[in-house]
Amino acid sequence: MDVLLAFSRPALDWHALAPELTLLAFGTLITVVDIIWDDRSKQAMPTLAGMGLLATLVPILTLAVDGTDRAMFAGAYVVDDFSLVLKALFLISGYIVILMSVDYIREGDYYENEYYTLILTSLLGMVMMSSSRDLVSVFVALELLSIPAYMLAAWRKGGPRSNEAGLKYYLMGVFASAVMLYGMSLVYGLAGSTTFDGIAQSMAADATNPVAILGILFILIGFAFKVSAVPFHTWAPDTYEGAPTPVTAFLAVASKAAGMVALIQLVFVAFPGRDDVVQPFFWVISALTMTIGNLIALRQNNIVRLLAYSGVAQGGFMLVPFAVAAEAPARAFEAIVIYLAIYAFMNLGAFTVVLAVARKTRSGEIDSYGGLFQYAPGLAVAMTVFLAALAGIPPAGGWFAKFGLFRALLDAGGAWAAALGVVVAVNTVIAFAYYARILVQMWFQPIPDGDNRPIAVTGSLGAALAVTIAATMAFGVLPGLVGHFGEVSVLSALGG
Amino acid sequence: MVDALVFFIAAAVCLTGALGVILARNPVHSALMLVMTLFGIAVQFVAQEAHFLAAVQVIVYAGAIVVLFLFVIMLLGVDRAQDLELSILPGQRWAALVFGAGSLMVLGALIVVVGEPVTGAKSVGGSASTAENVRLLARSLFSDHVYAFELTSLLLVIAVIGAVVLARKPSQSELPLVEERGEN
């Protein structure tokens, strides 16, 4: 008995854990600096947080150069190229969000130091998510990224809309977590293992059990809340509108990407044999999400709400490849990763422009963008690039993401894939209508209040714009760049 | 023999507590009766050799959750019987009776239909080990799941920080600025 139960220390690969530890160290450092120097340290906080994210990229680069796949804790934690690509994506998105936050948080009435601590913690959860290959780690990572996000959404304590945003997000998030946990307990009960590999093996061996279907659906529904897929999207617009704008950008990009990453791992690693359940689910969900997100976006007058619904619709596009995950696994996988990367930059860019414009107009209405080109040509051109990217017009990056979707659908073939392709095409056209509305406002309409003083773009916002524009254009002109990352991650995750 | 004796005594304790929860006039008594039920269930867990679950049952439910109930009851000051009458929804008692009788019938029907309800088969596919489960849990927690376990501690710290920030009342000097974004 003692042989069986003798405790052996789990093997720790410190190099593989280095990104998380660096992030954790900086998060702790911020808290300690805050305690010691209090208000005098406020100026240094964004710098410190940004440095933390850049420092975390260093071990990710060394791991990527090293190139070996590392697995720990009986396969529950894996560092491979897929996880490294996504970790880097999360950190860069986080860095852009911090650039967007600097002035906004400093000028508003916010607790600054805790804001950056929470952003770093949430990013830690995302970084952990991309390596997690078992149910327990996935759940802890999800909570670690969500709980700071709930609080960040309510960060403008004086504003009732922000409180509403936080509360709605929290209640829906907790509800989704409960549904997901129930599904996880069912799946664990059947499989007898929490690791994705173990679940995949057991599902392959016992393909008829109806309880498995329930478990899989509950888990997927839990994450569908996270990526705000219709009909689980109801929290998204109110939360996006009420939360401080940099937090909205963070939720719309990083948090959604983390949910997608979890779905990728679940669909491709844990449930590869259950495409009879997974594919119809995603077919319906993605078609609904695209269509309803786009149709409601048509009627929005507030730009943040419009971007929220457009984000819902874009999430629907990202869910499309899951519906052909069995017929064309490599293509589908690649399409999602590429879409995630491009979406992150174009959407963050659009939010940066919204932030910069709101500094002058103090308004979120689309009408307030009238004549933007006359007094802020730079911002108008930037917004045009991002909207063109979101709509999928070359040469801005978005077209390649959509191209990836169609390629996956064509590779899969069959009537269902073709039908979904038609839905995607129709929705791309609908989406163009509301993106064009903003373009018309900016380029052709008169300035609503006649105030044509130029907008002063602050240094950090300018930096965020520069990074996002460069990335959006680079992905559009040189799609091989992002395609390379997609291929690399496919190879590692599917064992190709 | 001893097993059966333990089962019936614990079951009697559970049921007495459960009846006490709904019949006591004073909400504080109801909460205390709930503790009794939870203790009875903990004893049942011990009888099933689920020692860890028994400990968690006592610590979390009897210890933390019921204490929370009592806090709320006393903070709201509804610790007298007549206050309770105010908050009863119309038809609440009848609905409770119908649902209770319904679930009893479903349970009874299951026992009758299945015939031999106790098969001894495991309901989960997990590896059944003869070792004590407290040890197994500890081993699993500190080896395979140590990473998630450690990060859970971070999660709790962050939750506390955030809760303090959100719950803290701003002092006069830092009253919120009104922001116009989205409202005009």
Image (cartoon, coloured by chain):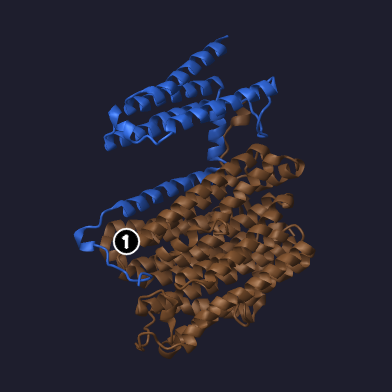
Chain colours: A brown, B blue
Kind of residue sitting beneath label 1: Tyr
Is any part of residue A146 visible from this angle?
yes
Is any part of residue A483 visible from this angle?
no
Decide which of A124, A163 is in the foreground and name it: A163
Q: Determine the residue located farthest toward the left in the rendered image.
A: B172
Q: Residue at x 69, y 67 (%)?
A: A487
Question: Considering the image in quadrants, where does the N terminus of chain A appear?
Answer: top right
Decide which of A70, A237 is in the foreground and name it: A237
Position above or below: B148 against A374: above
Q: Position of residue B2 (x, y in %)?
A: 55, 10
Residue named by callout 1 = A111
Pointer 1 indicates a residue of which chain?
A
Residue B86 picture quarter:
top left
Q: Residue at x 48, y 16 (%)?
A: B12
Q: Position of residue B114 (x, y in %)?
A: 69, 23
Q: Position of residue A185 (x, y in %)?
A: 59, 40
Label 1 residue SS: loop
Q: Position of residue A27 (x, y in %)?
A: 41, 58
Q: Residue at x 74, y 51 (%)?
A: A276
Position above or below: A273 against A335: above
Residue A226 falls left or right of residue B116: left
Mark 1 neighbour density, 10 Å: few (under 14) some (14–19) many (20 or more): some
Q: Determine the residue located farthest toward the right in the rendered image.
A: A414
Question: Considering the image in quadrants, where does the C terminus of chain A appear?
Answer: bottom right
